[in-house]
């Protein structure tokens, strides 16, 4: 039997021991878990960036992977913790919009984390990533049914601008990220383009009033 996979993405950085504490809690609950660090360099408290990062790596993991994402400026407040089952994957973290792309792109079951039996004793008001989200992820990896963690909800937080506005022959999108190479990443997916494309159709991109009439698939295609 293959070990369960848990990925971690946070804004904690790598200088402190916070990520190590999260890993320890997961391994206490399920010692044979394979824990993978995706990134801990999300800009502090930047929920939008965290939501985007999640979109870039989840499709490349096998079904059953548990993704813990913690960018949590509202930690200790009344914001909910949630676990999501979607597309054969599981997602654990704060209900603050981090999982907007997951929720926008397919059917999902969302559960509020209310069953304290699956939390660490003495939950810190400033470290739910360790005491709630990592603990739940560990139990989930050990085989606890997702329905055991709390009631199903139908109103998770979704960030504005997650999906583009699609009209008959036009898509209105937003730039949501500028990557390490200076590429502008939009919220328009290939599936969105395919939904309005017709054989032989021409494309035109307008950004800040500048019109581009050529689409290229790689840098070498640009004159």
Image (cartoon, rainbow, N blue to C red):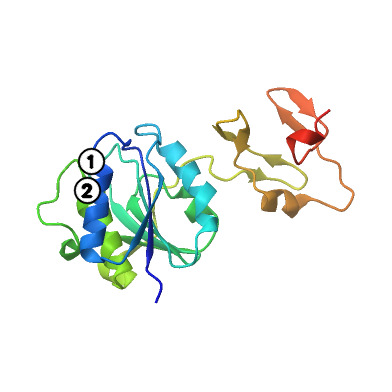
Q: Secondary structure at mark 1?
A: loop
Q: Could you say where residue 138 lies in the image, as x and y percent from the top left? A: 27, 62
Report the residue at 86% width, 41% height from top.
202
Quarter of the image containing the C terminus?
top right
| Depth order, front residue of 123/115 | 123
| Depth order, front residue of 170/69 | 69
Residue 74 visible to the viewer = yes
Q: Could you say where residue 24 lies in the image, as x and y percent from the top left? A: 22, 54
Report how far apart the C-alphas of labels 2 and 1 lie in the structure. Answer: 6 Å
Viewed as shown, does residue 3 lie left or right of 78?
Answer: right
Q: Could you say where residue 87 lies in the image, as x and y percent from the top left? A: 50, 64
Up-down: is 34 above or below 171?
below
Using the image, tell me which numbered label, if any, was put on residue 17.
1
Question: Farthest residue in the bottom direction?
Answer: 1
Viewed as shown, does residue 16 lie left or right of 11?
Answer: left
Question: Farthest residue in the left direction?
Answer: 122
| Depth order, front residue of 209/2 | 2
- Answer whether labels 2 and 1 touch (C-beta < 8 Å): yes
Residue 150 visible to the viewer = no
Q: Which residue is mark 2?
A: 21
């Amino acid at each position: 039997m293959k070990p369960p996979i848990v990925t971690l993405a946070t804004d904690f950085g790598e200088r402190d021991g916070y990520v190590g504490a999260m890993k320890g809690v997961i391994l206490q609950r399920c010692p044979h878990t394979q824990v993978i660090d995706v990134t801990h360099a999300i800009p502090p408290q930047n929920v939008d960036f965290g939501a985007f990062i999640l979109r870039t790596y989840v499709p490349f993991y096998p079904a059953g992977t548990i993704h813990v994402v913690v960018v949590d400026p509202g930690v200790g407040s009344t914001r909910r913790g949630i676990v999501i089952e979607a597309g054969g994957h599981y997602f654990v973290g704060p209900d603050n919009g981090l999982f907007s792309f997951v929720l926008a792109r397919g059917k999902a079951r969302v559960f509020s984390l209310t069953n304290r039996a699956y939390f660490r004793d003495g939950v810190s008001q400033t470290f739910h990533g360790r005491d709630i989200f990592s603990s739940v992820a560990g139990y989930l990896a050990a085989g606890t049914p997702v329905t055991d963690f709390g009631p199903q909800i139908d109103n998770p937080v979704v960030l504005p601008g997650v999906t583009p506005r699609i009209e008959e022959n036009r898509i209105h999108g937003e730039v949501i990220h500028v990557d390490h190479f200076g590429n502008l990443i939009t919220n328009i997916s290939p599936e969105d383009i395919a939904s309005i494309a017709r054989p032989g159709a021409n494309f035109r991109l307008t950004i800040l009033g500048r019109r581009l009439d050529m689409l290229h698939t790689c840098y070498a295609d640009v004159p």
